[in-house]
């Protein structure tokens, strides 16, 4: 069954994002399979990394996730309306003006100080090396504290420092092992079993995107997001002719190009020139400057106007695009946006 996120206009949108909720459930179950006794908590902040917070959260809970993690009280409120029984933790800082909303929504907060109002369950955060939020030294847990946490800085790339952070956390929290302790993200969950403790906080892996930036499937995880458009116009460039701003691509021989009505305003970044997409199922290079509303590809033989263009899916991975643009898969996924009259996101649930 396909669930649209907005009313369908009757035709193919210029940008179509499809999120496979069956893959979300599969990934949650796969991640639970690598755990010993720890609970799996799923991070759905930033609209579930661009995948759709409410449908993804519901699928994750159905597959066995026991808590949902967001960045703001507003995100928590949206989830609470849709999932009244879910356990929800706000990871980000909370303004005093938001406390009543947090209390009313029955959500838990992550805090780095003792000054916490009554009636809210909190998790004390210890800075073990991230150098961002968190206490330099853990205070004695007080009434209302239900968890102790920290945050790895480089678990995907630096096992030595990651193990040092874990040692610091375990030493500081050893007297309070009766509380829920959690530090592992996706990378640590998959590569450092000792960090799993009482709960793990998995985000990127739930969406089938590698926390290590590699193309090989990790623990059998499946990408949940597919992004499609179409060839809106076919042009043949003569020798010396160019396409796009700055004339960054100039034809050295007669070259058929396709113009795709997707650009950086849709989340296909300007620095993705040189990446590859699929046109009618065949690999095609993105050439010239990606503009706000369009990009150009060198067309495979036989490709024509109206042919399908797969920006993500069928072997074209978010991780590939991230490497071309010099970023991480998280940013590519979070940057895919919907625009009225141009874009649509649908959810497959079967």
Image (cartoon, helix red, strand yellow):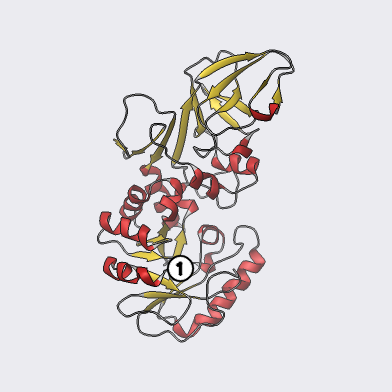
Please give the name of the residue rendered at 40% of the width and 40% of the height, measured from the top-left corner. 19
Quadrant including the C terminus: top left
The image shows residue 36, relative to residue 167, as above or below, that is above
Please give the name of the residue rendered at 45% of the width and 65% of the height, measured from the top-left corner. 92
**Image quadrant of residue 251?**
top right
The image shows residue 242, relative to residue 137, as above or below, that is above
Q: Is residue 35 visible?
A: no
Q: Residues within 10 Å of mark 1 (few under 14, many from 20)?
A: some
Please give the name of the residue rendered at 52% of the width and 25% of the height, measured from the top-left corner. 260
Label 1: which residue?
93
Left or right: 322 with respect to 124? right
Left or right: 31 with respect to 130? left
Quadrant including the N terminus: top left
The image shows residue 182, relative to residue 224, as above or below, that is below
Q: Position of residue 150 (x, y in %)?
A: 51, 71
Which residue occupies the foreground of this view, 276 or 100? 100
Q: Is residue 271 visible?
A: yes
């Amino acid at each position: 069954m396909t669930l649209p996120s907005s009313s369908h206009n009757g035709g193919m949108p210029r940008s179509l994002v499809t999120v496979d909720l069956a893959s979300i459930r599969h990934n949650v179950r796969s991640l639970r399979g690598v755990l010993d006794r720890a609970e799996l908590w799923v991070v759905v902040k930033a609209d579930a990394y661009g995948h759709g917070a409410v449908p993804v959260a519901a699928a994750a809970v159905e597959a066995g996730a026991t808590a949902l993690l967001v960045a703001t009280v507003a995100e928590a409120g949206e989830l609470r309306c849709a999932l009244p029984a879910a356990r929800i933790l706000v990871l980000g800082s909370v303004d005093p003006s938001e406390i009543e909303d947090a209390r009313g929504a029955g959500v838990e907060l992550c805090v780095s100080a003792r000054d916490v109002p009554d009636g809210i369950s909190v998790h004390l955060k210890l800075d073990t090396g991230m150098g961002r939020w968190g206490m330099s030294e853990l205070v004695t847990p007080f009434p209302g504290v239900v968890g102790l946490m920290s945050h790895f800085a480089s678990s995907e790339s630096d096992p030595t420092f990651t193990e040092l952070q874990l040692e610091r956390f375990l030493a500081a929290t050893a007297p309070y092992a009766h509380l829920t302790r959690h530090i592992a993200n996706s990378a640590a969950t998959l590569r450092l079993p000792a960090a799993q403790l009482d709960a793990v906080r998995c985000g990127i892996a739930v969406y089938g995107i590698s926390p290590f930036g590699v193309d090989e499937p990790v623990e059998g995880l499946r990408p949940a997001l597919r992004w499609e458009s179409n060839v809106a116009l076919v042009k043949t460039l003569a020798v010396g002719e160019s396409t796009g701003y700055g004339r960054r691509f100039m034809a050295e021989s007669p070259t058929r190009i396709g113009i795709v009505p997707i650009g950086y305003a849709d989340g296909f970044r300007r620095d993705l020139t040189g990446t590859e997409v699929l046109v009618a199922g065949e690999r095609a290079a993105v050439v010239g400057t990606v503009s706000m509303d369009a990009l150009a590809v060198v067309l495979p033989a036989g490709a024509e106007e109206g042919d399908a263009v797969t920006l993500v899916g069928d072997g074209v991975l978010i991780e590939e695009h991230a490497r071309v643009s010099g970023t991480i898969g998280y940013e590519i996924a979070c940057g895919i946006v919907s625009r009225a009259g141009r874009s649509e996101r649908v959810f497959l649930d079967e």
